[in-house]
Amino acid sequence: MKTVLTIAGSDSSGGAGIQADLKTFEAFGVFGCSALTVLTAQNTKGVTNIQEVPASFVKEQIQTVLDDLDISAIKIGMLFSNEIINTVKESIKDLNIPIVFDPVFISKAGSKLLNNDAIENLKTLFEYVDIITPNLFEAKELFDYDILNEKSLEVISKLPCKVVIKNNKITKDNEVLSLDTLFEKKNKKVFYTKLIDTTNTHGTGCSFSSAIAANLALGKSIEEAIKTAKDFIYYAVKNAPNIGHGMGPISHKKGIECLVKQKDFT
């Protein structure tokens, strides 16, 4: 069995962060292990408190796992501080396995979760990862991204890693689609599903990036991993359990059940 490590924050409501990553790993038949960076008190309505894990303990968690387990891929999520960013960078810089980085620093509502100096420091991780998965707000902050901004596309084309930018929306043949775009140097490829009109989207970004990591561990190409992750999220959102009074979580179990009916991912 392949083993995948997630380095990310905890979500006490179980919908995002480490909890979503481990559910996603389990869904794809890989064994998940974890290194926690922050503890959060949160629910579907929002975050009420954050407790940072000391960087030295983050390092110890990562190293202890790497010393014992044969890790096939890594997913990185919320890193929270410069100290943790630097610790994670030091821990991964010499590894030769697929690494997926979800640069969690701006929420879907557009709220910043990191200081500006830490955001700049995030960029120093790019040369050590295979792909980053920013949302539209994060891509705007990192690259001044706009689909019509040729200058930002030039910046992306010079990055040392691949980039998949999430959450664009387009209308095609009177149907609204959810669009993710993969940039690899000057090449790009579009992945889309129908856009579901729902508030049950808590943890979609975490689960998307961890699904990519799981599929890379299983030997899939980047494009195959993204397509599989995109379809998985679509089904997981479509079959969400409708719990909580805010942005509800998705159903990882139903997501993989529907995906399996469509194709063999193993």
Image: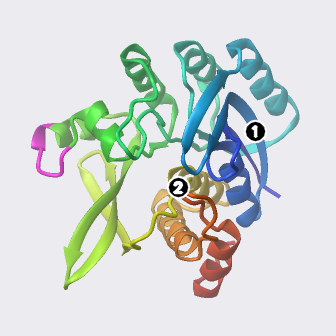
Q: CA distance from mark 1 to mark 2?
A: 27 Å
Amino acid found under the numbered disc labelled 1:
Ser
Residue 109 horizontal side relative to residue 81, left or right: left
Residue 218 part of the magenta-drawn span: no
The C terminus is located in which quarter?
bottom right
Q: Position of residue 114 (x, y in %)?
A: 45, 23
- Please identify the dominant SS of the magenta region: loop
Residue 87 horizontal side relative to residue 27, left or right: left
- Few, some or many residues within 10 Å of mark 1 (<14, 14–19, 20+): many
Q: Position of residue 10 (x, y in %)?
A: 69, 38
Front position in the image: 108 or 34: 108
Up the image or down, 174 lies above or below 122; here it is below
Secondary structure state at the residue bearing disc 2: loop
Amino acid found under the numbered disc labelled 2:
Gly
Classify residue 174 by image quadrant: bottom left
Upstream in the sequence, badge 1 or badge 2?
Answer: 1
- Rendered residue at 54%/42% (across/down): 46
Q: Are marks 1 and 2 in contact (CB under 8 Å)?
A: no
Q: Position of residue 159 (x, y in %)?
A: 33, 34
Q: Is residue 13 visible?
A: yes
Residue 150 part of the magenta-drawn span: yes
> What residue does disc 1 label?
34
Q: Which span of residues is magenta-colored?
A: 146-151
Secondary structure state at the residue bearing disc 1: strand
Up the image or down, 125 lies above or below 156; here it is above
Residue 217 horizontal side relative to residue 191, left or right: right
Q: Position of residue 188 (x, y in %)?
A: 28, 57
- Rendered residue at 51%/56% (across/down): 247
> What residue does disc 2 label?
246
- Rendered residue at 26%/54% (across/down): 187
